[in-house]
Image: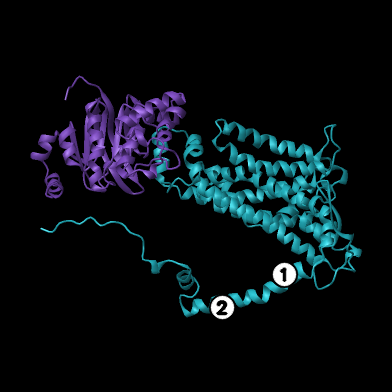
Chain colours: A cyan, B purple
Amino acid sequence: MSVFDQQSTRKPPISQIGAVLWLRTNLFSSWINSALTLASLYLLYIMIPPLLDWMIFNASFSFGTVNLFGFDIKFSEAMATNQNCGREGACWPYIYEKLYMYTYGFYPRTETWRPNIVFGLTALLFVIVPLVKHYKHKNRVTLSLIILYPLVSYVLIAGGFGILMPVSTDQWGGLLLTLIIASVGIIVSFPIGVLLALGRQSNLKVIKLFSTLFIEFIRAVPLITILFMASFVLPLFLESGNYFDKLLRALIGIALFQAAYFAEVVRGGLQAIPRGQYEAADAIGLSYFQKNVLIILPQALKISIPNIVGSSISLFKDTTLVLIIGLFDMLAMVNLTSNDPYWLGRETEGFVFVTIVMWAILYSMSRYSRKLELRFNTENTN
Amino acid sequence: MSTEKTNIIEISKLNKWYGDFHALKNIDLNVKEGEIIVVCGPSGSGKSTLIRCVNFLEKFQEGTILVSGTELTDDAQKIRKIRSEVAMVFQHFNLFPHLTIIDNLTLAPIWVHNETKLEAREKALKLLDRVGIRDQAEKYPNQLSGGQQQRVAIARSLCTSPKIMLFDEPTSALDPEMISEVLDVMVELAKEGITMICVTHEMGFARKVANRIIFMDDGQIVEENDPENFFNHAESDRLQLFLDQILTH
């Protein structure tokens, strides 16, 4: 009888690790792969240097004297004009001059501190929420933030109530408006979307029919059409006295539009939940409401995070469409300011700037989604 | 079996169809309080369907089921009352993967039975102790082995102090080496006088603890008997064939 010999564990052979091996397996594993690698390198070689030349080496950074948080930083004697910026490079002083309009639109310059506080609060929120994760009353804190934050933000930005100078929505614009439309659109539409998704799976035929009709109708219509309807057609049906705010109408349109998309995303998540989860929840005596809130939705939403964020990113980009109903978001402001006769021919700088800002925001959103996914992942935690 | 005990489950003339498929045909079955019943039979014979009717996970079209004197109807109130007395253990455990073990156990006591978090937690820890996995309380279901998960599932169903336990093939999805740890827990339970209906192919378990074994085929109860006569003096050829197939390994 042979004796069983216990094998000891050891590291993989040294020839199977290292940088050369990485290059060979990932970039040059076959002749097609090698060709693609070289072609990509060549493409980068012809694209990157001119871009850098335009953005940095030939560009003008003559901002004059900039006041940053109370400190004067002197870039140059005087701010560059359209004429003394070269044509072969970007004229960033143009962006600097229009930065206010890109950020706040026509918001009164004396009241800028109000949206600034809101921007600050928003940033603070992203810092606070992860910090209270382990705090005992985190649910209470989160809930009060959810209620307080929009209220405070609204009061600050809109003003009124006898304390702050009222600023009508016509004056809101730029990045401020983009962020308002996107966040209100996403936050309001999300619960509606979840309800519609549950409705579409409901045993109650009337609710199911209504949800399905609503979702399919909205999804079959472009957002522009819905914005037009909300902006121009809806007032026709209302009595002339009931004219309500243009921004509010656009927000309602966007929220309903996004709700239909969220509903489909969440429905996908719901369908991925095994029947056994429903049965177990039923068997321990949970009600329909408890079953969905405690068992089904937490799992379904977790699965849907990538798609929820994807859909939110789409919406963020779609907010640029509000231009057509006369709201001036960031992109619309770029368009508008490029007509400035003093700065003719500088729209490229504006669009490049918007691209960079949009990319920074949306890429952070997508990274945040990845973090959320990891945080809620209880499947493979060991 | 003592005759003075009352029927806790009364099933009469139960008929169930899936579309056109006649899954249960005229089932009559009474279960006394504290009785341990094992249901076996080939797959597709309707045994799972039968016990799933008892806590109304499946709707049926004809016949009546009385649980503790309450008749099963569409009335959501009544169904929830019955479900709080009838617990079920599933083949695939069906633990809630997004909750820790302890949260899996305390969910129903807190939300359905309005217990305080502290009470529920204390009771849950005791039950986990009883099934031998108290030290895993803060882990998530997917960090446990199949056998441990099924023991958690049993503890979860015990949390609401049910009068009746339904087991739907509790060991069929387990690796062979884990079956006995689950069966041991079930044997312990059986000794405590809880009413049990088990759908299972574990004939050793049936022989050891069952008061009555029911053999189903083609949606009908073909034969029912006490373990001794069930295994040694099968009345029908169908049961004899079934026993020959599952016992000759």
Taking the image as shown, residue A167 lies to the left or right of residue A212, namely: right
Q: Determine contact: label 2, label 1, CB under 8 Å.
A: no
Choose between A141 and A35: the one closer to the eye. Answer: A35
Q: Position of residue A343 (x, y in %)?
A: 88, 64
Looking at the image, is B27 positioned above or below residue A190?
Answer: above
Q: Quadrant of residue A243?
A: top right
Task: Sort mark 1 into few (<14), some (14-19) or many (20+) by Cα contacts within 10 Å.
Answer: few
In the rendered structure, which amino acid carries the disc numbered 2? Leu
Residue B63, percent from left and from top: 31, 34
The residue sitting at 81% across, 57% down in the picture is A333
Instruction: From the image, tell me which residue sits under label 1.
Output: A52
Element type at mark 1: helix
Label of residue A38 in the image: 2
Judged from this view, the residue extending furthest toward the left is: B233
Separation of marks 2 and 1 at Cα, in angstroms:
21 Å
Please say whether residue A217 is visible from this viewpoint: no
Q: Chain of mark 2?
A: A
Query: Residue at 49% across / 79% down in the picture?
Result: A32
Residue sitting at x 56%, y 53%: A307
- Quarter holding the N terminus of chain B is top left
